[in-house]
Amino acid sequence: MEINKNDEFTIYIDGYTSEGAGVGRIGSYPVFVPFTATGDMAKVRIVKVGKTFGYGKLIEIIKPSDVREEPICPHFSTCGGCAIMHLNKSERLRFKREKVSDALKRIGGIDAYVQDTVSDREEGYRNKSQMPVTDDYQQGMYRTHSNTKVAVPNCVIQDEASKRIIGKMLNLLKEKNIKPYDPETGEGVIRHLYTRVSGKDGSVLLIVVLAEEVDLSLVKKALEDENVKGLLLNINPGRTSVILGDKTEVIFGSDHIKDSLSGVDFDIYADSFFQVNRFLTQKLYDKAVELCGLTGKETVFDLYCGAGTITAALAKGGAGKVIGVEIVPSAVKAAKKSLARANIKNAVIYEGASEIIAPRLIQKGEKADVVVVDPPRKGCAPELLSALALMKPERIVYVSCDPATLARDAAQLKNSGYEVKTAVPFDMFPYTYHVETVVLMSRVKE
């Protein structure tokens, strides 16, 4: 059967892509259709025809699946954020479990047991927001794969205090006639309003990102009835998709807030990495510590340790000694400060690339009984995976934000004598297709 762009078909949806689009078939030809669900009978229009698969646009649900539900957000399908909000909760969690399982099998050749997805509260879970500003001074988002801004004044996954404070700041900027920035033309001033919210005390750090410097000193009084810990002005004049520029000044208050994990306070700055889900992060860290199987004697390497959040959890969770390694100097400084403030004596932080520092430590006589890795989305450096094979820790606990790179790295570790014992998905980003996973790999006895 010949299939052309703009052709319309009625198809049955029987699966999902890794990004949450439904998958149906015209004969044996797969078609990916966003906002459909397994079990849907859907009328679709073909919008792109490839050699091995195509893309369709949903026209009508002819017969809905019983896993569908009405999205709770009025902006669903327009802002590009929550791709699977049309699925009920059990289907969303099943999708994420299957996403991890499928990646391990298809990419890594690993048929491992994947536990049920761990979840918690779904609305207002984000402690961080980075909102572009629409032409009519509303909080916005970008459409998927686009520079087009759409108004999202009441994003359901953002913190309520954050939305309220951003809204108030927008009114102040509108009164001062400071124009929103246009990424297409480079004209205008207001690029983003960016907040960090503390789960410890609810305080907010507000960062106003502008294309040029503007006097914001007069807004202090308007914000004094809010729990704004600090107001920062960041200047980003470049034609770039990067949110923060190089220059930041404090207009009033502090340049950071404090949040707490594992009973340890951490300083959170504008550019700090800190898990965004305030309700689920501690559960994820507790699971990572549990899978380490600590008895009080082990030396644990915590690689890609960031600001030391997992390092602290390990040190307080039964490790004899924890060695954290992180390449970002500001994160290393923050980690050392937090550990010292908490009087944690059994942890030390080294600055540098994990794939370089870890082998050096082994050469100096350190022995890693357990290794925890929490790499960025691109996964572990190949050199680090090779180093782990030579280090031969009994256990490797891998914290992943991308099942594809997790599966790739797990396959290399499998070839080095490790097997996946268990994988636990966490719904760290409800309503989106993203999933965080904690995996235990154990060394196969020679």
Image (cartoon, rainbow, N blue to C red):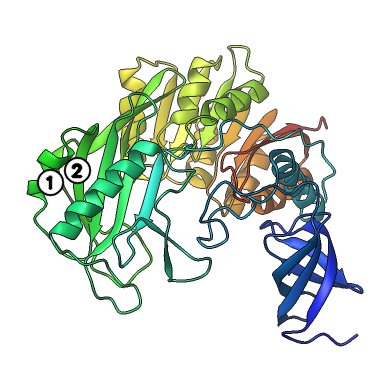
Quick check: 134 above or below 65?
below
Q: Is residue 368 visible?
A: no
Q: Residue at x 36, y 62 (%)?
A: 242
Amino acid carrying label 1: it is Val
Q: Residue at x 53, y 46 (%)?
A: 355
Q: Is residue 33 left or right of residue 360?
A: right
| Residue at which label 1 appears | 219
Quick check: 87 above or below 112?
below
- Find numbered disc 1 in the image and state the secondary structure of the residue it sits on: helix
Q: Could you tell me residue 210's position as x and y percent?
A: 22, 61
Label of residue 15 in the image = none
- Find numbered disc 2 in the image and state the secondary structure of the residue it sits on: strand
The residue lying toward the viewer, choosing from 341 and 172, is 172
| Residue at which label 2 appears | 231
Q: Is residue 98 left or right of residue 262?
A: right
- The residue carrying pointer 1 sits among few (fewer than 14), some (14 to 19) or many (20 or more) residues within 10 Å by Cα, namely some
Q: Could you tell me residue 319's position as x and y percent?
A: 55, 17
Q: Is residue 306 left or right of residue 386?
A: left
The residue lying toward the viewer, choosing from 353 and 409, is 409
Quick check: 123 above or below 48?
above
Between disc 1 and disc 2, the foreground one is 1
Report if the CB atoms under discs 1 and 2 are less than 8 Å apart: yes
Quick check: 419 above or below 1?
above
- The residue carrying pointer 2 sits among few (fewer than 14), some (14 to 19) or many (20 or more) residues within 10 Å by Cα, namely many
Q: State the residue lying farthest toward the top.
A: 296
Amino acid carrying label 2: it is Leu
The residue lying toward the viewer, choosing from 96 and 267, is 96
Q: If you read the primary sequence from the N terminus, does the residue marked by circle 1 or circle 2 appear first?
A: 1
Q: Could you tell me residue 170's position as x and y percent?
A: 25, 54
Q: Could you tell me residue 279's position as x and y percent?
A: 51, 29
